[in-house]
Amino acid sequence: MDEEKLIEMISAAVVRVLKEESQGGAPQESAGAGAEPAAEDLTVLTDLTSPEYKQKLTVPDAENDLALRAMKGATTARVGIGRAGLRQTTKAMLAFRADFAMAKDAVMKPVDEAFLRKLGLPTLLTKCSDINVHLTRPDLGRQLSEEALRFLHEECIQHPQIQIYVSDGLSNSAIEHNAADLLPVLMDGLKEQGVKTGTPFFVKYGRVPTMDAVSEAVGAEVTCVLIGERPGLAAADSMSAYITYGAHTGIPESSRTVVSNIHKNGIQPVEAGAYLVDLLLRILSEKKSGVDLKL
Amino acid sequence: MSTEKSEILSVGIDIGTTTTSMIVSRLGIANTAASYMVPDISITARKIVYRSEVYRTPLDNRSRLDGDRIREIIRAEYGRAGITPSDVDTGAVIITGESARKENARVILESLSSFAGDFVVSTAGPDLESIIAGRGAGTEDFSSRYSCTAANLDIGGGTANIAVFSCGRLLGQTCLDVGGRLLEYDSEHRITYMSTSFAVLARETGIKLQIGQILTQEQLLAAAQAVAAAIFDALRPESGHLARTMLTASSHPLAVSEPIRYVSFSGGVADCYYRCEQDLFRYGDLGPAIAHCLHEQTAGFEVIRPRETIRATVVGAGTYMTEVSGSTISYSEDIFPIRNLHVFALSGQAEQAMYQGDAQQAVRELNWFLDQSAADNAGIGLQGKKQLGYHELCCLAQAVLEMDGSVFAPSKPLIIICENDMAKALGQVIRRKIRRDKCVICLDRIRVRSGDYVDIGKTVMDGAAVPVVVKTLIFGA
């Protein structure tokens, strides 16, 4: 039997089965448990990445809906998502892929330039020339470009008590969603306390230790970077503040104090800004950060 | 900012229709957030270190509490517990039960304040008593541990306090004027007392009894049956007629849509219930008979054993009345403790306008409130926003300043209590814009309603947070 004939036979068989199924009306009972709830308005599209969808009960006939709801409320992990036969449901799979896409976008897309202009932040580059270099060469991301160094020396306030700047890190959306609300609370709060703060700016393709190079360049006593966290499947827009007293190249990571999880479903950016004001003042007065600082 | 743990000493005193008791507990306060996050401070341990005996509540006559004897009991119990007023950080005195017996409650509370140290003497309204009893009985924890809906029925001498919890959340509460001491009789079963609420109940259920009459077991059970029926009537989805008739004056009918699966009993009657008291005439009241009749009412529910029975309310008062504020609060001066701060919660509309910088409605509402309560100061309750932008924050701060300037005298502290996490940011912005010598306090994670009174304790965790007791006073001003 030649190959062509075989394919023809197989197609014919498949078409026959499909026809039978469509005429047969009721399809075979699928593996029992796990069918998605039937009554659903198909004209309204649900945002599968929304917190509301994540809290929705998608297990039909659960033994204890209250317990299921409590479990889902206790974690952003994908628990109690139901199943179709042995596999996950289409919706659960789509939700996973939507979250994954958001995480990838958060890493790959640059921070909107118009957004940075509005905040009045000039952009400085590290030694990374594009996003792929940024992702594959952390060593280059820790160093500032010649132009950036020139800018820091010539255009910025020298020897500030506290240097604050913003960097993309691994999430542009973290910056776009949180920096505009946090930064002014922080800057105004420090100014009010009479602290000499440095010129704020944005570092593109930055890593956390880039702050050591920044600190050396401007001669800052305390350096604080607001940086996008590596996105997960739960939150793609989480920002952190890393603070280092007397930062210099090669300083151990244990010298950094961090405040993480700043995002709309975590610590509110304005409240985080207010918290950081007090924290920075303490680090300035105690002259230490990281594990040496008892919180 | 915060040491790892703090501990505060809390006293709970319950003066009920029939019994009075006291407990001493240690509340452990700790930061539960990871070191790389903004602290999250909460009460993590509640340990009861002393329980008093249960005393018969001393009365001058039917409607007046005997303040001197109550004070003596508490003084003796402080001695036995080995504590002095200055050791005590927080706590609550609760006068529960029949409202008729609360005639001189205010005076009692004032006379007990000498035992308070820096803690705060407070009372709860009937609804709050129900919640406190449900927490003290452990029913809230049960509903959380087993992800279920459970009701606690605290049946005392004069009132039945009901609270329903689901998965650790309060669904609703109510209070009825029924209990074991609505009717009393002597050793010959001759009726010596019937409360006014018993007269109402008797009329509703066709019971005909008179003072001086000898009570038969049948009549006793009929009266108890009426009480038990009223209590379970309150658990119906729409709250039945009998329950509504017996509703305590300032309480509300239960409005719970979820089916209730478990019930627990606390209060004096609960002890009779769980040990299946056989002698129905034992205490000269309805208690054991009510307990007997409850057995017939519980069909359709699963009955669970509470952590506390007769002491549920006092345990609740001593261990659950105190909350801890959010850890990102702001205060310009340490003027704590603050006692009996009357709170006015702005309407949602007024608050929304403030996010646009418009304080007009807030000023109107606040003036009305001060007028009504004949006061010159109040704490401002705000709901706050889950997601607050910088611009809105500045507008809100501006509006708060405007409100403060046009309503309060400059010498008065400005105290703001928000439900959502935004107090530190709001406090910082306000302080930046206000006169330097003005005292500004902003707290969050505390939910208040208009008319509530709030006690704010001395700071804990190195000044990061404050203990707070929110209470509703039941007496008019």
Image (tube, grey):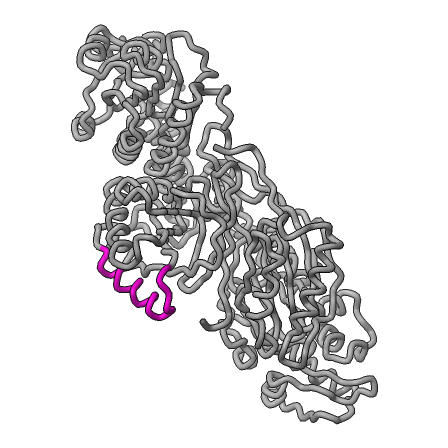
Residue at image x 62%, y 44%?
Answer: B45
Residue B473 spot, x, y in % from top left: 50, 66
Q: Quadrant of residue A145?
A: top left
Magenta highlight on residue A43: no
Q: Nearer the viewer, residue B436 or A249?
A: B436
Residue at image x 35%, y 16%?
Answer: A221
Q: Quadrant of residue B266?
A: bottom right
Q: Residue furthest top?
A: A146
Q: Is residue B299 left or right of residue A214?
A: right
| Residues shaded magenta | B359-377
Residue B470 spot, x, y in % from top left: 49, 57
Relative to B200, say whether A24 is above or below.
Answer: above
Q: Nearer the viewer, residue A92 or A21?
A: A92
Q: Nearer the viewer, residue B270 or B95?
A: B95
Relative to A59, say whether A136 is above or below.
Answer: above
Magenta highlight on residue B362: yes
Relative to B376, say whether A230 is above or below.
Answer: above
Q: Is residue A80 left or right of residue B203?
A: left
For the C terminus of chain B, give its image quadrant: bottom left
Q: Nearer the viewer, residue B407 or B399?
A: B407
Residue at image x 37%, y 61%?
Answer: B344
Magenta highlight: main SS? helix
Q: Is residue A214 left or right of residue B27?
A: left
Q: Is residue A108 visible?
A: no
Q: Is residue B353 left or right of residue B328?
A: left
